[in-house]
Image (tube, rainbow, N blue to C red):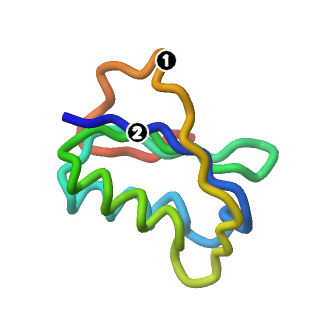
Amino acid sequence: MTTVHLEIVGKVQGVGFRWFVRETARRAGLAGWVRNHDDGRVEIAASGTQTAIDELTNVARTGPPGARVDRVTELPLDGLSDLPRPFTVVR
């Protein structure tokens, strides 16, 4: 199992980004969550096979139609344990 913790910056709120990520993660069988931040960032924590994590990371780099991803940063894995299944949107 591989875990990833990502921060996405750009036009990633108000364009269906979280739902796009959730559906991709669920199809790939990942555990985890995606959430918005008040400053416009989106944060993703996911765990699963390396192939599924790679797929999610690639999707996060482009987003859905209408999104613009300026930067994807890997965050520390500190504090990430027991990620929920199925993958969910945290409000």
Question: Left or right of 10: which side holds 26?
Answer: left
Numbered circles on residues, count: 2
Question: Left or right of 13: which side holds 17?
Answer: left
Viewer-proximal residue, 14 or 2? 2
Q: Quadrant of residue 57?
A: bottom left
Q: Residue at x 55, y 69 (%)?
A: 16
Q: Residue at x 60, y 54 (%)?
A: 72
Q: In the image, is residue 80 above or below residue 73?
A: above
Q: Secondary structure at mark 2?
A: strand
Residue 69 pos. (x, y %) = 65, 68
Q: Residue at x 24, y 46 (%)?
A: 30
Residue 26 pos. (x, y %) = 25, 56
Viewer-proximal residue, 24 or 59? 59
- Please state, as top left, top right, bottom left or bottom right, where the N terminus lies in the image: top left
Q: In the image, is residue 2 above or below residue 68?
A: above
The three-letter amino acid code for the residue at tag 2 is Val
Q: Secondary structure at mark 1?
A: loop
Residue under numbered circle 1: 78
Residue 29 pos. (x, y %) = 18, 51
> Of the numbered discs in the image, which one, if any, rests on residue 4?
2
